[in-house]
Amino acid sequence: MSERQRNWVATMKGVAHSGGIVLAHAGEPPPRVHPLLRDRQAREDLEERDLVDGATKARGSGNRRQLEEPDHLRTCFEQDRDRILHSTAFRRLAGKTQVFVFPADHQRTRLTHALEVAQVAAAVARAVGLNVALTEAMALGHDCGHGPGGHASEDAFDPFIPEGYHHAVWGADVVLPRLNLCAETLDGIRHHSWSLPTPTTPEGVVTSWADRCAYSAHDLEDAISAGIVSIDDVPQSVVEVLGRSRSAQLDSLITSLVRCISSTGTIGMDATCADALGDLRAFNYERIYRRPESDVQTAAVVKILTALTEHFASHPQLLSEALSLEEVEADPVRAAVTYVAGMTDRFAFDAAVRLLNWPSNQLPQGIDIPRQSPVA
C-alpha cells in the first residue's frame, strides 16, 4: 500500500473530538460558528421578508400532484432542485448533444449547458429578489426532455406522437413527473421555449431568457474553438453591444435583464441588447446550426432515431426492463419514443449498430477541435 493510500485509509472514520463529535480533519479544530438553525420554516420566513412582491414563495411541501410531508430543512423548491440534480434524466444530459454529437474535450453537452443556464438564471433572480431555488430547479431540468442528437431528435419523434414532440413539454409531462415536482417548477420547464405560452411565474420567464442568453453565447464560443467561425465573422451589431467574449456577452445580457426588471418591473431586456441578442442567435442559426455539415448530421440522427423507435415499437418486449408493463401495453409506440428519447448519443448509435446492423460510416460524426491546454 502506498503512502497516499495509507493516508486515505487513515481518514476513513474522521477524527474523534471532545463531546462525542467527529471532525473531518486532523490538527486544529475548525472555526466555531454561532449556532443558528435555518430550517425550512426559517427560510420560508426569510422569503416573505426578502423576496419582492410577485416573486414565487415556497410554503410547506409545495403544490405537488402527490401530497408529501414538508422537508424539515429544505423548501419545496430546494427539494425540486435537488431531485432534478440527482435524477437519472439529468445525469444522462452529460451524454447528449448540445451542438456537436460526440462532444470533444471542452465542448458543451446538454448537462454543461443546463448548468450554465442555471448560473445565468440565478444571477438574475438573486439580483432582483426572485426565488433563486425555483429558477435553479427550472434551469437544471429544462432540457431533460431532449433526446439524443440535439434538436434533430424532435424531428425524428414528431411523427410518432399525435400531439407532436417538443422537448420542453416532453420533459415536464413525461420525463420528470415521477419526481413529483411542484407545479410551478414543471410549468417553467414546460414553457421555457419562446415558441410556447408564457410561464406563469416570473422565475419561469427569467429561466427562458437565461436559456437563450446562455446558449447563444456558449454555442458561439464552441464554434469558434472548433474553427467553424471566427469572432471576426460575428456582426458588428453584436460585438459593439455585447462584446467579443462569452463572459462579456453574458455580463451585458445579465446586466440588461437586471436593469430592466429592477427599473420597470417587467421581465424583459432593453431593445438595444435584445436586438444584439437576436442578431447573435440569427448568426448562430445560419453559420452554426444550419451549416451544410450540421444538416448532414441532422439527417443521420433523424434516420437512426426513426429506425430505433420503429424497432422497439415492433418489439415491445425489449422495453420491459426499462419501462413498466402498463406503460408498454397502453401504447407501445409512445413507450418506444420514451425509451429512445432517454438514450445518450453513444448508447443510441451503438444500439443502432448492435440491433439494426447500422453501417458505422452512416453514423453522425463528431467534430475535432484544436488541442487545448488542460490547465484552464
Image: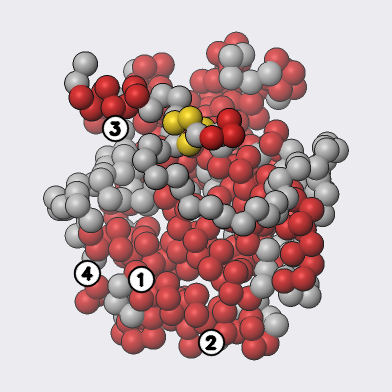
Secondary structure, mark 2, is: helix
Query: Label 4 amino acid?
Result: Ser
Label 2 vs label 3, nearer the camera:
2
Q: Position of residue 185 (x, y in %)?
A: 70, 52
Quadrant, the N terminus: top left
Marks 1 and 4, Cα distance to the nearest angstrom?
Answer: 16 Å
Q: Are marks 4 and 3 in contact (CB under 8 Å)?
A: no
Q: Residue furthest top?
A: 317
Of marks 4 and 3, which one's residue comes earlier in the chain?
Answer: 4
Query: Label 3 amino acid?
Result: Gln
Secondary structure, mark 3, is: helix
Marks 1 and 2, Cα distance to the nearest angstrom?
Answer: 20 Å
Q: Tag on residue 247?
A: 1
Q: Tag on residue 271?
A: 2
Give 15 or 111, whichever is nearer the viewer.
Answer: 15
Q: Are marks 1 and 4 in contact (CB under 8 Å)?
A: no
Q: Are marks 1 and 2 in contact (CB under 8 Å)?
A: no
Q: Measured along the vertical axis of the image, is residue 23 above or below residue 182?
A: above
